[in-house]
Image: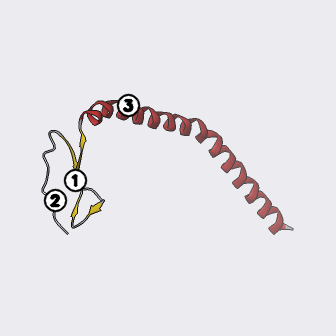
Amino acid sequence: MQECSPLPTTTGIAHPGLLLHGAGSVKFMLPALPFSILMPALSLLLVFRTNTGYSRWNEAHPSLSLSLSLGLGLSLGLSLSLSLS
């Protein structure tokens, strides 16, 4: 298999390609402009999604703690009442 020479990354993103034609592989370039434009938008979306998930966890945590505490108290009380009788 032939080794692909590195292509300059100033004009785009280089990938050696996965399609084989004959003895060599197909080389193709992706333009860097769409990635440059979309990167700030994608990073903001990731931040807002993380903040949304964290706020949902903060809302759910008290009720989850309460239900676990009540379940533990119920199981301990039940086990104590059964062991005493």
Quarter of the picture containing the C terminus is: bottom right
Tell me the residue at 80%/68% (across/down). Answer: 83
Residue reaching furthest right?
85
Give the total of numbered labels: 3
Q: Is residue 76 above or below residue 85?
A: above
Q: Is residue 70 left or right of residue 61?
A: right
Q: Is residue 70 above or below residue 19?
A: above
Q: Nearer the viewer, residue 20 or 54?
A: 20
Q: Is residue 65 above or below residue 23?
A: above
The residue indicated by pointer 2 is 4
Mark 2 vs mark 3: give the one in front: 2
Q: Nearer the viewer, residue 40 or 11?
A: 11
Inspect the image, locate mark 2, and give the three-letter code of the amino acid beneath it.
Answer: Cys
Q: Which mark is residue 27?
A: 1
Q: Nearer the viewer, residue 56 or 75?
A: 56
Tell me the residue at 74%/58% (across/down). Answer: 75
- Crowding near pointer 3: few (<14 within 10 Å), some, many (20+)? few
The residue indicated by pointer 3 is 44
Mark 3 vs mark 1: give the one in front: 1
Q: Is residue 22 left or right of residue 55?
A: left
Secondary element at tag 3: helix
Mark 1 vs mark 2: give the one in front: 1
Question: Whole-percent x and y of residue 39?
Answer: 31, 34
The mark nearer the N terminus, 2 or 3, is 2
